[in-house]
């Protein structure tokens, strides 16, 4: 169970990183700061959630 949650959390992190890598450089420079900032905040929140989940899984595995 814990191993499956760990795999899922890692998968979410990988998908978030893939989205960042696919973002064209022009999107970061096109002046559309509002939408880009919104997406950035969503990715940060998703990454933080995945890291919290990894921490919880690791903490439970250590017990």
Image: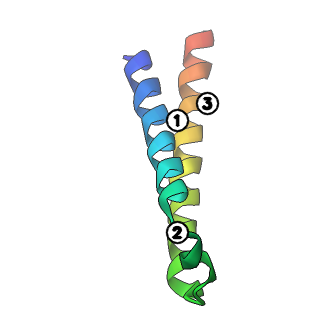
Residue bearing the label numbered 2: 24
In the drawing, what numbered circle is on residue 55? 3
For mark 1, give the secondary structure: helix
Give coordinates of residue 49: x percent, y percent: 53, 47
Residue bearing the label numbered 1: 53
Task: Look at 48% across and 49% down and name the residue there.
Answer: 18
Give coordinates of residue 14: x percent, y percent: 49, 40
Density class for disc 1 (Cα within 10 Å; few <14, some 14-19, many ≥20) is some
**Can you tell which quarter of the image residue 59 is in?**
top right
Q: Is residue 8 above or below residue 32?
A: above
Task: Look at 61% across and 30% down and name the residue there.
Answer: 55
**Can you tell which quarter of the image residue 45 is in?**
bottom right
Q: CA distance from mark 1 to mark 2?
A: 30 Å
Q: CA distance from mark 1 to mark 3?
A: 5 Å
Asked if the residues shown at circle 1 and circle 3 are in contact, with their CB atoms under 8 angstroms apart, the answer is yes
Give coordinates of residue 39: x percent, y percent: 50, 70
Query: Looking at the image, is mark 2 or mark 3 nearer the viewer?
Result: 2
Q: Is residue 60 above or below residue 31?
A: above
The quadrant of the rendering that contains the N terminus is: top left
Task: Look at 43% across and 25% down and name the residue there.
Answer: 7
For mark 2, give the secondary structure: loop
Task: Look at 56% across and 31% down and name the residue there.
Answer: 54
């Amino acid at each position: 169970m814990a191993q499956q949650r760990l795999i899922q959390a890692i998968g979410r992190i990988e998908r978030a990183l893939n989205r960042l890598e696919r973002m064209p450089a022009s999107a970061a420079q096109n002046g559309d700061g509002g939408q880009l900032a919104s997406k950035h905040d969503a990715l940060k929140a998703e990454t933080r959630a995945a890291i919290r989940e990894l921490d919880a899984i690791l903490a439970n595995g250590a017990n």
